[in-house]
Amino acid sequence: MEKPLTELGEGKTGIITKLSGGSGSGQGVHGRGGGGVKQLENLGIRVGKSIKIVSIQPFGPIVVEIDNHRVGIGRGRAAKIYVELENP
């Protein structure tokens, strides 16, 4: 079942199925605003890649691991990353 990244718990892993949104003005990667699919792709966050939730900060970003790299993603942008759970 496809879910937004924000609905996964810590330690969960999934395959990215969709990146929605454009260059909107919502909270972006690292909470800097802007964002967009291109910025996520530049960080290695692409459809077909495996992504793991490392930690969920109470009032901050969601830290993910992709290709052995950790990245903090603002919740607004993380909600636009859809994944299929690997181990539901």
Image (cartoon, grey):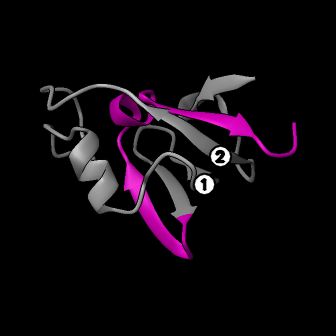
Q: Position of residue 8 (x, y in %)?
A: 67, 35
The circle drawn on residue 15 is: 2
Amino acid type shown at disc 1: Ile
Q: Residue at x 32, y 54 (%)?
A: 41
**Nearest to the observer: residue 12 or residue 57:** 12
**Nearest to the observer: residue 87 or residue 8:** 87
Q: Is residue 54 left or right of residue 80?
A: right
Q: Residue 19 is drawn in which quadrant?
A: top left
Q: Is residue 88 left or right of residue 43?
A: right
Q: Residue furthest bottom?
A: 68
Q: Residues within 10 Å of mark 2 (few under 14, many from 20)?
A: some
Q: Secondary structure at mark 2?
A: strand
Q: Position of residue 33 (x, y in %)?
A: 15, 38
Disc 2 vs disc 1: Cβ atoms closer than 8 Å?
Answer: yes
Q: Is residue 7 left or right of residue 75?
A: right
Q: Position of residue 16 (x, y in %)?
A: 57, 43
Specify the segment rendered in magenta: 66-88
Q: Residue 74 is drawn in which quadrant?
A: top left
Q: Which residue is mark 1?
A: 51
Is residue 8 shown above or below 39?
above
Is residue 66 shown above or below 85?
below
